[in-house]
Every structure is written in structure tokens, then in C-alpha cells.
């Protein structure tokens, strides 16, 4: 049974809102090992422990400690194999454009997140992550 769990792709979801983290984990379904982080520093702690097995990072844009685009830039430098997805509830076009160019954003998702779109985007991201590792 442990081998089955290890075979599931790992996804880190970062959001300062506890309800958003729980909803994402539920939306991702049982196909992924979802690791939840309450902020950028928490996410980096998880990546320092689990980074080699993490395929995708999904992060909220606006968070109290550090913005998601800053986290994505750091992850891009330290863990280039990880596919990065940015989530936002706000249309901050200039900031989002900068995030795309500097953090290597795979996709931008708008809140509220729907179950179908979460699953669809994660499936595409996992495929992209597998290609990066080859």
C-alpha cells in the first residue's frame, strides 16, 4: 500500500486561508499527495524536506507574509523541476504579468477554484512536470 501512495504525484498548495487549503485538497481528489502550506515560508520548509518528490506548486498570489510571485521566483531558482501555478482572486494585471515572466508560471487560476478546473490543470501540470524530469 505504501508503494501506491508514493506513486501519486505530490502537489504543494499554498494559501493563508485554511478553508481554501481544505477545499483545494478535496478538489484535487485522491489522485495526488497534497501537501498544504499556510504561507511562503511554510512552503519552503516543505520543499526543503520533500522537494525532490514534488511535481507541482500551486500558490495564492496575495498572502500576508510574502506574495506568491516572490515564492514562485524562489522555487524557480531552487527547484526548477517543479511546475508553478498561480492562484488569484484579484485582477492585478501588471503584477500577474511580472509573475509570469519572472517566476515561470505554468497557469494562472482565478478564485473561486472549481473542482473540474483544478483537476484539469493539475493533470496538465503533472504531464509538464514529467517532461521536465526526462
Image (cartoon, rainbow, N blue to C red):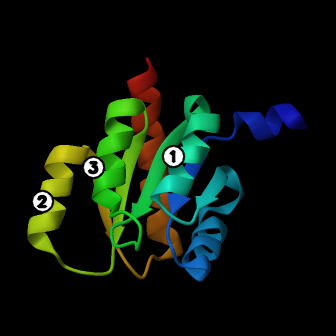
Residue drawn 64% across the image and 54% down it: 34
Q: Quadrant of residue 98?
A: bottom left
Q: Which residue is mark 3?
A: 105
Q: Residue 112 at x, y = what percent?
A: 42, 82
Residue 97, numbered circle: 2
Q: Residue at x 14, y 47 (%)?
A: 101
Looking at the rendered image, the quarter that the C terminus falls into is top left
Few, some or many residues within 10 Å of mark 1 (<14, 14–19, 20+):
some
Name the residue at 39% across, 42% down.
83
Question: Which element type, helix, strand or loop, lies under badge 2?
Answer: helix
Vertically, is 33 above or below 94?
Answer: above
Secondary structure, mark 1, is helix
Label 2 crowd bin: few (<14), some (14–19), many (20+), radius 10 Å = few
**Is 6 in front, or is 121?**
6
> Which residue has dot 1 on it?
44
Question: Which of the two residues, 82 or 134, is positioned nearer the viewer here?
Answer: 82
- Is 72 above or below relative to 52? below
Foreground mark, 2 or 1, reads 1
- The secondary element bearing badge 3 is classed as strand
* Residue in the foreground of this view, choosing between 24 and 59: 59
Does 88 sit left or right of 17 as displayed? left
Q: How many marks?
A: 3
- Whole-angstrom CA distance, mark 2 to mark 1, is 23 Å
Q: Disc 1, disc 3: CB below 8 Å?
A: no
Q: Residues within 10 Å of mark 3 (few under 14, many from 20)?
A: many
Mark 3 and mark 2 lie on one chain; the one further toward the N terminus is 2
Which of the two labelled residues, at mark 1 and mark 3, occupies the earlier sequence position?
Answer: 1
Residue that sits furthest to the left in the current view: 94
Q: Percent position (x, y) of residue 38? A: 56, 66
Q: Earlier in the sequence, mark 2 or mark 1?
A: 1
For residue 16, say whether it is visible: yes
Contact between labelled residues 1 and 2, with CB atoms less than 8 Å apart: no
Amino acid at each position: 500500500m505504501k508503494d501506491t501512495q508514493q506513486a501519486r504525484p505530490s502537489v504543494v498548495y499554498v494559501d493563508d486561508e485554511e478553508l481554501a487549503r481544505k477545499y483545494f485538497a478535496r478538489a484535487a481528489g485522491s489522485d495526488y499527495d497534497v501537501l498544504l502550506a499556510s504561507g511562503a515560508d511554510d512552503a519552503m520548509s516543505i520543499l526543503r524536506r520533500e522537494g525532490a518528490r514534488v511535481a507541482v506548486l500551486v500558490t495564492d498570489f496575495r498572502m500576508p507574509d510574502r506574495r506568491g510571485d516572490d515564492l514562485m521566483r524562489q522555487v524557480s531558482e531552487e527547484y526548477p523541476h517543479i511546475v508553478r501555478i498561480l492562484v488569484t482572486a484579484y485582477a492585478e494585471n501588471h503584477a500577474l504579468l511580472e509573475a509570469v515572466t519572472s517566476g515561470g508560471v505554468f497557469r494562472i487560476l482565478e478564485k473561486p477554484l472549481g473542482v473540474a478546473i483544478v483537476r484539469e490543470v493539475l493533470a496538465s501540470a503533472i504531464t509538464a512536470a514529467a517532461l521536465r524530469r526526462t
